[in-house]
């Protein structure tokens, strides 16, 4: 599934779109700027210098091009017949005072939001893009996970320590993938090897990755907006495996200590599996053997039917939430898609809950009592994260809807071809090839998933993010 990009040309539609996106941000109460008291506290905050000095280890970061809020840095090396993986996380707990102004504002926001006209950060930029960020060639306190892997990529042991680190390189996905494809060395040279082993371990556990194409609204220097749809590069999937491994280690520490907060998701029920099997049959790519994770991993990314299948598979990845506990571990702690207990613990600059996970794990690793501020506020976290997740979801979907309506405005009154992704009664989710728009449309009664239908564009309302079709 190659990268696709559809532009909204400069026009009256572009002006209307800019106004709609501004109104959307205002309706969500998601300000970019921070109160003066929050900024002042962030500017004055200082994290204690760790006793452990790991600046001799050449860590590197790997993120989208231009990123400044760098949560993770890695170092990979061979160890006998296996590997040593070091994964450093930004020491946000060291910079944010519990009960302070930065803490209170972060709890109100919950997570960094990604709007079409810029990010709405969780923390002031002086922290998220400067002093707490793992920027290259800067000394930073970090929470360093060290993993010993065997030759199959199985974690034999791990530890967590607070240390002073120094990243040597800020890598980005596209150029790193190109360098790896050319067989070049560098900080990420072992990432394909270790990443592939961890993907195999995911398969053995019975895990599944959806890997839907990323859908992103971008804004060019001339003010025009575009929608990009692209499948993650292999290097992104390998890098994600390091984060998953760390999240599973964090979950195991918290479960062992009897206190923590986990990211959970129930197993799909048989009704959901049966419905998905019928959809794969209708799309001409039947799932007949193996687990659903095996089936999704083996899909051909260049096959035009893969996107409709992945969209249909999204129904199997529902019900994710957070469960907090202190004293007794709940019975259902597994994240079904990962096929293991899992915790968010690798993105504290961008996600509120990771600060709690890291504070708990560090205390457990050091044999200390979990801080009282953690225990007192732990029960509040699931609701805070649910609220911020809903806000992020509304922002993402409404932004895409507004941009897609702007893309379709020049085509009102015209006919377009669309591929049916999923049948929903008398309507269907459809994918238009050009411009790249996903929408809901009426369809003939005998239409099946995967069919191409001819639609007329009746109306495109940018402010409401609505597109109306007739069959």
Image: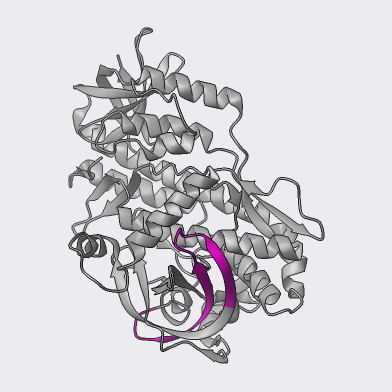
Could you tell me residue 199's position as x and y percent? 43, 51
Q: Is residue 31 left or right of residue 97?
A: left
Quadrant of res 238: bottom left
Residue at the (42%, 56%) spot, across then down? 197
Quarter containing the C terminus: top left
Quadrant of res 416: top left
Q: How many marks?
A: 0
Magenta stretch: helix, strand or loop mostly:
strand
Relative to 409, say whether 91 is above or below: below
Residue at the (45%, 27%) spot, across then down? 289
Quarter containing the N terminus: top left
Residue at the (57%, 82%) spot, across then down? 162
Could you tell me residue 345's position as x and y percent? 56, 64
Could you tell me residue 282's position as x and y percent? 38, 17
Q: Is residue 239 left or right of residue 378?
A: left
Residue 97 magenta-drawn? no
Quadrant of res 305: top left
Could you tell me residue 69's position as x and y percent? 41, 70
The residues colored magenta run: 135-160
Which of the two residues, 340 or 212, is positioned nearer the viewer here? 340
Q: Is residue 99 left or right of residue 439?
A: right
Residue at the (29%, 34%) spot, across then down? 437
Specify whether residue 112 is in view: no
Q: How is the image coloured?
A: one colour
Residue 154 magenta-drawn? yes
Seen as rendered, the residue at the extreme front is 81
């Amino acid at each position: 599934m190659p990268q696709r990009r559809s532009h909204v040309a400069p026009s009256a539609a572009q002006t209307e779109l800019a106004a709609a996106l501004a109104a959307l941000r205002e309706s969500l109460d998601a300000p970019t700027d921070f109160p003066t008291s929050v900024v002042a506290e962030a500017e004055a905050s200082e994290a204690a210098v760790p006793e452990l000095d790991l600046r001799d280890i050449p860590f590197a970061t790997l993120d989208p091009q231009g990123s400044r809020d760098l949560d993770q840095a890695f170092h990979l090396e061979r160890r006998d017949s296996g590997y040593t993986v070091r994964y450093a996380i930004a020491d946000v707990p060291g910079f944010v005072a519990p009960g302070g102004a930065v803490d209170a504002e972060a709890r109100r926001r919950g997570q960094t939001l990604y709007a079409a006209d810029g990010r709405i950060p969780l923390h002031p930029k002086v922290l998220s893009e400067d002093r707490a960020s793992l920027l290259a060639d800067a000394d930073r306190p970090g929470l360093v996970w060290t993993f010993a892997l065997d030759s199959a990529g199985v974690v034999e042991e791990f530890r967590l320590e607070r240390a002073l680190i120094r990243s040597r390189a800020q890598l980005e996905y596209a150029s790193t993938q190109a360098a790896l494809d050319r067989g070049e060395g560098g900080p990420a040279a072992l990432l394909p090897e270790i990443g592939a082993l961890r993907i195999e371990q995911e398969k053995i556990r019975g895990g599944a990755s959806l890997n839907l194409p990323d859908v992103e609204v971008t804004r060019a220097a001339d003010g025009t907006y575009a929608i990009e749809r692209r499948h993650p590069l292999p290097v992104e999937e390998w890098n994600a495996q390091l984060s998953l491994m760390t999240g599973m280690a964090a979950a195991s520490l918290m479960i062992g200590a009897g206190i923590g907060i986990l990211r959970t998701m129930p197993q799909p029920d048989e009704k959901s599996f049966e419905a998905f099997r019928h959809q794969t049959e209708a799309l001409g790519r039947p799932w007949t053997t193996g687990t659903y994770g095996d089936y999704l991993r083996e899909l051909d990314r260049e096959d035009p039917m893969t996107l409709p299948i992945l969209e249909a598979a999204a129904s199997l990845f529902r019900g994710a939430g957070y469960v907090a506990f202190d004293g007794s571990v709940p019975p259902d702690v597994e994240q079904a898609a990962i096929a293991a207990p899992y915790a968010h613990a690798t993105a504290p600059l961008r996600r509120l809950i990771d600060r709690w996970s890291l504070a708990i794990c560090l205390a457990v690793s050091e044999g200390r009592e979990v801080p009282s501020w953690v225990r007192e506020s732990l029960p509040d976290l699931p609701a805070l994260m649910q609220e911020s997740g809903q806000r992020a979801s509304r922002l993402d979907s409404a932004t895409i809807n507004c941009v897609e309506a702007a893309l379709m405005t020049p085509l009102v009154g015209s006919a377009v071809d669309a591929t049916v992704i999923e049948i929903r009664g008398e309507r269907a989710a459809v994918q238009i090839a050009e411009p790249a728009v996903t929408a809901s449309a009426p369809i003939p009664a005998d239409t099946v998933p995967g069919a191409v239908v001819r639609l007329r564009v009746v109306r495109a309302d940018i402010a409401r993010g609505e597109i109306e079709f007739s069959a």
